Image (cartoon, rainbow, N blue to C red):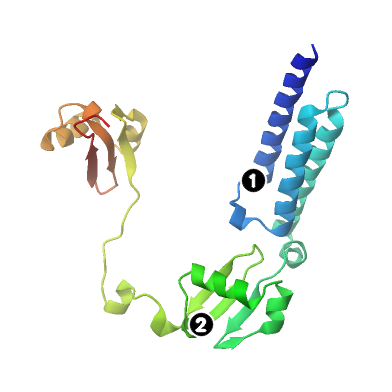
Amino acid sequence: MSFLKLCLVALGSFGALFLVAKCIGHKQIAQLDFFDYITGITVGSIAAEMATELENPWKPFTAMVLYGGITVLLSVISSKFPRTRKYLNGTPTILMDRGKLYYENLKKAKLDLSEFMVMCRQQGYFDLTSIQTAVFEYNGKLTILPVSNQRPATPNDMDLCPEQELLFTELIMDGRILEDNLKRMGLDRIWLDKQLKQRHIHSPQEVVLAVCDRNLKFILYKRNPSGD
């Protein structure tokens, strides 16, 4: 009986953690601010405690809901009242500008010079003279504006007007035709069969992936002869 109760409590813990995570929202680790990061660790710890708490599982459950609710509330407050963001999330800090390194701002951001150099190299800047401005964002990422003559050339710089690329939609995956995507694109099986025949494909099962964009640019990847 206790084993069954343990399983039920563990499932309840997983469900509660899932719901709280959905309410908080989806963010990558690099996008989390300090408070979100701490809240994530705390909620995870409480969920682990709840999974093994057989006597009073409602206590860690209540704590988990409170942490999640406070996080959502602070998110709403920062959204409705932009002035509160600098107190809740912090503000960006300029670490370098126009060839000048702001050492005091480095200390404020809790970074030393070696860490700053590593972050620059990770973005491909091995020469600090190629950096116009470096900003340490509140989520812990370093944003770099390169010196104008060091940035990559763009089509506008060369007076070029390349055709706008569009998103591709999957029409065939692992040999299976995705009927919903086909209809969403305003296409039908007749059009798709024609495209396959033009490429000497006799069956969709011969195709690993086939995609198409709004300009009807059709790209197909055949399955290897060995079937791998």
Is residue 71 placed above or below 64 in the rendered structure? below
Q: Residue 80 sits in which quadrant?
A: bottom right
Left or right: residue 8 compared with residue 222? right
For the point 15% across and 27% down, the residue is 202
What is the three-letter code of the residue carrying label 1? Gly
Residue 219 at x, y percent in the picture: 23, 44
Residue 217 at x, y percent in the picture: 23, 47
The answer to whether mark 2 and mark 1 are in CB contact below 8 A is: no
Residue 157 visible from this viewpoint: yes
Q: Nearer the viewer, residue 51 or 85?
A: 51
What is the three-letter code of the residue carrying label 2? Leu
Secondary structure under tag 1 reads: loop
Is residue 50 placed above or below 30 in the rendered structure? above
| Quadrant placement of the N terminus | top right
Q: Residue 189 sits in which quadrant?
A: top left
First in sequence: mark 2 or mark 1?
Answer: 1
| Quadrant placement of the C terminus | top left
Q: Characterize the local packing of mark 2: few (<14), some (14-19) or many (20 or more) Cα atoms within 10 angstroms.
A: some
Q: Residue 150 sits in which quadrant?
A: bottom left
For the point 71% across and 47% down, the residue is 40
- Between the C-alphas of marks 2 and 1, the distance is 37 Å
Residue 93 at x, y percent in the picture: 66, 75
Q: From the image, tell me which residue sits under label 1.
A: 25
Q: From the image, tell me which residue sits under label 2.
A: 128
Q: Nearer the viewer, residue 89 or 97?
A: 97
